[in-house]
């Protein structure tokens, strides 16, 4: 296998709904894949609670077996899961619980840090080294996707809570991810069904960035770009595919870590492109790691081959792919 094809696999970030690896995931790991996201079912995502069957099945030993199996095939990996205060805690039942939104808001910064530290220690003990948390979005209006799933309704409270979370996780040896830049204070439409858009100016978005600034100041390892289209951009573009927004993140906010996309097959991100063309567009825009939902996992090899073809044809600069793979492998360790 060529080094270019291994590099193309390295920038893909597939989601597993269970701890079992299917054939596409095994081939992905064998062919240079460096990242796995242990996700949840749609119902678990909506309710924020792992199913009783999962809680009974996914013991600490089961987590350890899965992690050992993955690293035996592929060496050091980014092994990720959600661990959200107000939404999904994927390691529920294995790690210590995280507080509910309102309870977390009532805690002092030191108290919240200690609670998050206890949860983070359990996440690390299970074998996870990166959480796709905390959420830095602050809602100012209607947003069916994130309603009830953010830390607070004002930017300063959210920033304080982000600092406590990130400090706690890092103290436990767990890397963190801010999501979803440039945030979604309001959202027209629903991501699972519609072409969802954020109809705010860049200045209106900037006014809510205190939590992102706090997390970056605390040294978060990754930032996840948003899946919706932003009308502030010309033409309106999904956050995950926006060179301008990634440039603002790198330049104005001085973020030097790994930039990941949200699920590339969200309707607002995919648009009328193929999955492979969307992946290439994200890399061209400056993303390093491309999140692919369970529905997209059967197409991992196809997307990797398309990335190779894009480099060979000059559509994607090899230096851009090199930078992305370097960021991924650096975070993997």
Image (tube, rainbow, N blue to C red):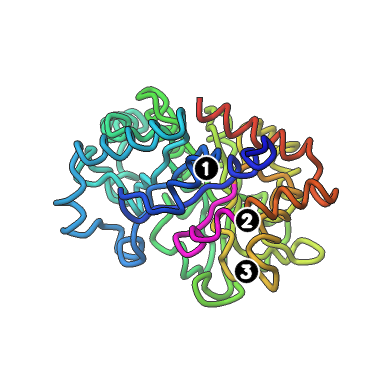
Q: Residue at x 27, y 29 (%)?
A: 125
The magenta segment is: 290-303
- Which of marks 2 and 3 precedes in the sequence? 3
In the picture, measured across the screen, residue 271 lies left or right of residue 109, that is: right
294 or 255, nearer to the observer? 294
**Location of residue 43 with respect to 132 vertically, above or below:** below
Question: Where is mark 3, residue-wise?
Answer: 268
Question: Where is mark 2, residue-wise?
Answer: 303
Q: Is residue 291 magenta?
A: yes
Q: Nearer the viewer, mark 3 or mark 2?
A: 2
Q: Residue at x 31, y 44 (%)?
A: 104
9 or 41, nearer to the observer? 9
Question: Where is mark 1, residue-wise?
Answer: 178
Query: From mark 2 to mark 1, how far is it between C-alphas?
Result: 26 Å
Q: Position of residue 114 (x, y in %)?
A: 29, 29
Q: Nearer the viewer, mark 3 or mark 1?
A: 3
Query: From mark 3 to mark 2, how far is it between C-alphas?
Result: 19 Å
- Which of marks 1 and 3 precedes in the sequence? 1
Query: From mark 3 to mark 1, how far is it between C-alphas?
Result: 20 Å
**Location of residue 78 with respect to 200 vertically, above or below:** above
Circle 3 — which element? Answer: helix
Q: Nearer the viewer, mark 2 or mark 1?
A: 2
Q: Residue at x 34, y 47 (%)?
A: 85
- Which of marks 1 and 2 precedes in the sequence? 1
Circle 1 — which element? Answer: strand
């Amino acid at each position: 296998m060529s080094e270019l094809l291994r590099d193309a696999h390295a920038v893909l970030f597939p989601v597993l709904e269970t701890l079992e690896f299917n054939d596409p995931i095994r081939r992905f790991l064998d062919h240079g894949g460096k990242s796995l996201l242990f996700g949840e079912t749609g119902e678990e995502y909506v309710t924020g609670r792992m199913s009783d069957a999962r809680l009974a099945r996914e013991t600490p030993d089961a987590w350890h077996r899965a992690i050992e199996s993955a690293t035996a095939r592929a060496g050091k990996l980014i092994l990720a899961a959600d661990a959200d205060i107000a939404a999904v805690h994927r390691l529920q039942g294995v790690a210590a619980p995280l507080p509910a939104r309102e309870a977390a808001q009532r805690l002092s910064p030191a108290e919240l840090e200690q609670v998050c530290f206890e949860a983070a220690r359990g996440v690390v003990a299970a074998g996870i080294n990166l959480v796709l948390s905390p959420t830095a979005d602050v809602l100012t209006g209607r947003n069916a996707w994130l309603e009830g799933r953010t830390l607070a309704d004002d930017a300063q409270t959210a920033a304080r809570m982000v600092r406590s979370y990130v400090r706690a996780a890092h103290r436990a040896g767990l890397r963190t991810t801010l999501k979803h830049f440039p945030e979604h204070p309001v959202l027209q439409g629903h991501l699972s069904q519609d072409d969802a858009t954020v109809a705010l100016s860049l200045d209106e978005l900037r006014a809510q960035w205190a939590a992102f600034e706090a997390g970056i100041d605390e040294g978060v390892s990754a930032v996840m770009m948003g899946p919706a289209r932003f009308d502030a951009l010309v033409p309106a573009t999904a956050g995950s595919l926006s060179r301008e927004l990634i440039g603002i993140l790198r330049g104005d906010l001085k973020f030097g870590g790994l930039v990941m996309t949200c699920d590339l097959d969200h309707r607002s991100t995919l648009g009328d492109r193929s999955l492979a063309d969307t992946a290439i567009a994200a890399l061209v825009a400056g993303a390093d790691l491309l999140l692919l939902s369970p529905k997209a996992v059967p197409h991992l090899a196809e997307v990797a081959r398309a990335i190779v073809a894009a480099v060979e044809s000059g559509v994607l600069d090899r230096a851009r792919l090199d930078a992305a793979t370097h960021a991924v492998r650096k975070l993997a360790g």
